Image: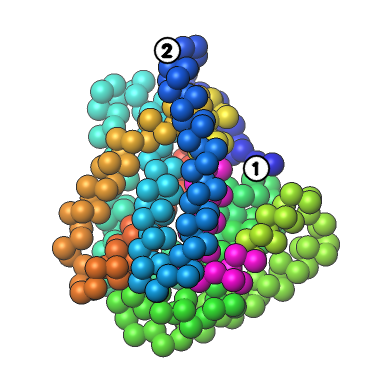
Amino acid sequence: MARRPVPIPAPAGARMLHGPAATLPGAGRGAVASLSCWLLPAAALLLAASALMPREAGWAAVLALVIGLGVPHGALDGEVAKPFLAPRFGRAWFLVFAAPYLALTATVLVAWRWVPDPTLAGFLALSVLHFGTEDAGPGRPVEALVRGGLPIALPALLQPDETARIFAVVTDTAMPVLPGWWSALAWIWLGLALAWLVLWRPASDTLAELAALSLAFLVLPPLAAFGLYFVCLHAPRHMRALAGDPARAPAVDGMGRAVVLALPVFGLTLLIGALLWPTYPQANGVERLLALTLQLLAALTLPHMLLDRWVEGRG
């Protein structure tokens, strides 16, 4: 069972949505539920099948799924911030939310250009923290490091050459091998993971998830395995947690509603990506998409995490 984020009490004056007015019509909700029953398994099959494609075709397939099915979960950040900002700022709440959010995003994108190596290190560290907190839940720091580190460390341990090839494109630098610090930290993670498995004896469902992910990173190319984790586990887990915790995002009272509410900001994210597209130096279209997608994911992760910490601090 996935653990939900710590419940956050709704701010005074925030309107809690209940009943039919807060949800999709019955037919719409049923359609979304029916869609989700086959969409994620279909995505998993396509991600696995990408391993049989030529490298660039496989990258393109994975990136399309990461963008279309993974990125929208972060588009609900506005719904998390709205109950805190709307009572104070009224209709201007979205501007108050979006201005610092976009400023932080832009700062990370600029950092990719000027200091790519430190930015890569920061991206990986934030990813471990973010994935681990989402997967393990609060108050489990060792489990969070193990689970959050898995999609970062295993590519370095199992397929270092292909991982280096991916991030040479992302950073637009020469990277014939992975940085030594990444490889060293991956081995440290492996020791920590083995100790945790022996000493903490995690639940069977957690073991099954870790085993399945480890197998994916063993047999699939690194980008496909990461896409499998991001699209089929991380993103839906985050959306289900919000849908199941009405105190955290009152308007997100079900998966159907979550999908609908994510669409406007997701559309804005696609527009930002389209505007940034001409600024990327990679001549190859798939490589340009790879760099843009992973850099933008890193740029959005920082304000996404800071918003979570801010909301928890307000609770």
* Viewer-nearest residue: 14 or 263: 263
Q: Report which residue position mark 1 lands on.
A: 2
The three-letter amino acid code for the residue at tag 1 is Ala
**Residue at disc 1, secondary structure:** loop
Look at the numbered discs 1 and 2 and tell me whether their residues touch, using CB distance below 8 Å: no
Q: Is residue 173 above or below residue 220?
A: below
**Residue at disc 2, secondary structure:** helix
| Marks 1/2: CA–CA distance | 28 Å
**Which residue is painted at 32% across and 45% down in the image?**
101
Q: For residue 157, which quarter of the picture?
A: bottom right
Q: Is residue 265 magenta?
A: no
Q: Position of residue 7 (x, y in %)?
A: 59, 32
The N terminus: image quadrant = top right
For marks 1 and 2 on the same chain, the one whose residue lies earlier in the sequence: 1
* Viewer-nearest residue: 257 or 31: 31
* Viewer-nearest residue: 172 or 47: 47
Q: Is residue 83 above or below residue 213?
A: above
Q: Is residue 280 left or right of residue 197?
A: left
